[in-house]
Image (cartoon, rainbow, N blue to C red):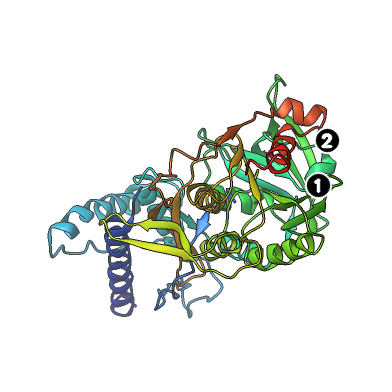
Amino acid sequence: MEKTVRPVLNFIIVSLVVLTLALFTFAAGLGSGYLLAEEGFGLMSPPAAPFPGTVPSLSPEPEGGMPDPTAEPLPTPLPLPTPRNDTEETFQLFWEAWDLLQRHYYEDLPSMRQITYAAIRGMLDTLDDRYTAFIEPDVAAVLEEDASGRFEGIGAYVDMDESGKVRIVEPFEDGPADLAGLEAEDRVIAVDGEAIVGVPLYEAIGKIRGPAGSTVALTVEREGVREPFEVLVTRERLDIPIVEVTMRDDGVGYVRLYDFSATASERLEEGLQELLDEEPVGIVFDLRQNPGGWLDQAIDVADLFLGESLVAVERFSDGTEREFKADAGDLAEEIPLAVLVNNGSASASEIVAGALQDNDRAPLVGTSTLGKGSVQRPFDLSDGSELRVTVALWFTPDNQRIQGEGLNPDVEVDWTLEERQADPANDPQLERAVEILLEGEG
């Protein structure tokens, strides 16, 4: 058996080394370091082609018989590889440590898959970039639902704060989270009793999500409440709200875009046409609490309001850059416009808001945006897992850096969480934007 096993094990070792070195090389060359977004979501470029090849696994052979194909692979002492260059010699430390564990650790060791996943996460931790993330296969499959606009979960937009806690950006109106009593700015620190503080956002989302009809217990921290408390939420099959359209009695149209999912620009165009058919004096475009989404949707959304002009610049770590432009001829290029933003406006929302601001197309009204201006490219790995890698930063047409800085409004109007909860119908930011349009300031 040893003669048969050893070549397979050597192949595993070489495959892992090559994969790790490839990931390090990619991160060094391209890395530049936000729901279900977001963060969620965050800004994402189109997915890359699937990673080629497969990695074989080896099950232990029971005494006196053939290998059990259903058995969990167990760690088997592996021979230390011989380094061929300086990089492999440095990485030799990993194999030395692994060899010592196999030979001397008292308890059972995890499987090679668990070890590999842990090694990838450890590598990413050194980047100090919470948006570059490894996503296990089951979580990756759950998150893939977002692009379709339907999913099973609690119904809330989320992101992660600086302390590693999942923040409720906004519950869906009348959704499960809303009806259970969750509020914007709540922090979820545990799911079904399992702590998730510091867990990567996408993994935390995967734990919060689940089949419609099932119940999840969320441990929540809330400002003004001394101790964490538990909220039980029954998950549902949900449609992600994308566009809300209202024609006001004062003649101003209102359109809110909730996120930049795969059909955002199409749905927004339909909503804008509905408003324009009623001949409004102007339109308020609401991007508050919008966590972002897909890059192509951000460009297409900005294009609906802009003539031929620059939308954004994508700048890579090697100094190269790519420009994204709008074309003339879209339906909302001439209508007076004002844009609402706040600290929940992130990523794709900031690209659109920055383009409209810098091209003097519309004033921004509200408070400063989040400052999430990096773009993540998703790579599909061979076992169904996913690696999301920060590959570039975004800059507005006037070269404003978004990442870590955000956008400042042209007209600052505060609206605190306490005020929103006390009287959600009294929206001073919206009313100020309407004033601007009615008075012809936009």
Residue 56, above or below 315: below
Amino acid marked by disc 2 = Ala
Residue 139 percent coordinates (x, y): 59, 59
Q: CA distance from mark 2 to mark 1?
A: 14 Å
Residue 167, above or below 88: above
Residue 189 percent coordinates (x, y): 63, 36
The residue nearer to you, when weighing 118 against 98, is 118
Label 1: which residue?
A: 173
Residue 22 percent coordinates (x, y): 29, 65
Packing grade of label 1 (10 A; few <14, some 14-19, many >=20) is few
Residue 222 lies in what quarter of the image?
top right
Point out which mark residue 271 bears: none
The residue nearer to you, when weighing 366 against 116, is 366
User: Which quarter of the image is occupied by the C terminus?
Assistant: top right
Which of disc 1 and disc 2 is earlier in sequence? 1
**Mark nearer the viewer, 2 or 1:** 2
Point out which mark residue 425 bears: 2
Residue 241 appears in view: no
Residue 211 percent coordinates (x, y): 76, 59
